[in-house]
Amino acid sequence: MVLLSLVYSPTFAETIIFIGGRKIEGEILSFQNGEFEIKTTRGNFKVHKALIYSIVINSSTDMAGLDSPKQSLNRWIDAAKAGDLEKLAACYSEELKQSKLKELKSLDTATVKRMATSATKTEFVMDDPIYFGDRATMQVERILDKESQITFLEFVFENGVWKLAQ
């Protein structure tokens, strides 16, 4: 059984918590067909997402090159600032992308410009995400004209990239 072969190693970026409480540290290399490929000191293993309770990212580790919910939201913010409706829609999960694109394309030019201006003037403060397998939740505070609004965003990990799931 794959789970018996995984070992704890403090040199990796992610702590994988399995259903039942067992923890290991490893590096997530990929996610395909519902399976995470995880690198440990004993080698690479594939583990189905149903066996994983949560994944904790070690924020003290250099995460350069790895996608994250924060990077996903930054892509959304950049697309909103540019008024790029295609890129905005691409930030959403496959399940939502087409409906979001249709919704965005129904906006008139003046509304898109207001949205871009608002995104440019807004300060976004992101907390560290909380991971649950291929899902994550992140608290985001939006500050515009000295008014603050806090929201929780849901993300899903699809094809190696975190996408908005709401």
Image: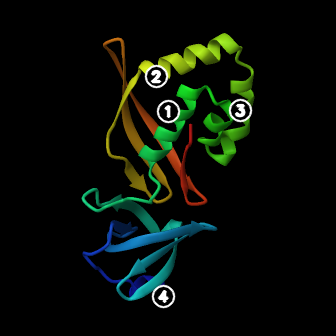
| In the displayed structure image, the side of residue 107 where residue 140 appears, left or right | left
Give the crowd class for mark 2: few <14, some 14-19, many >=20 residues within 10 Å: some
Give coordinates of residue 159: x percent, y percent: 61, 60
Spatial CA distance of label 3 from label 1 is: 16 Å
Residue where numbered disc 4 is placed: 1
The residue mark sitting in front, 3 or 2, is: 2
Please report whichever mark, 1 or 4, sits nearer to the chain's N-terminal start. 4
Which image quadrant: the C terminus? top right
Element type at marker 4?
loop
For the residue pair 126 and 151, the one nearer the viewer reads as: 126
Q: Residue at (57%, 13%) from the top-left corner?
A: 114
Residue where numbered disc 2 is placed: 120
What mark, if any, has residue 101 been given in the picture?
A: 3
Residue 161 position by quadrant: bottom right
The residue mark sitting in front, 1 or 4, is: 1
- Cβ–Cβ under 8 Å for marks 4 and 3: no
Residue 127 position by quadrant: top left
Residue where numbered disc 1 is placed: 77
Amino acid type at image mark 4: Met
Amino acid type at image mark 3: Leu
Q: Residue at (35%, 11%) from the top-left corner?
A: 145
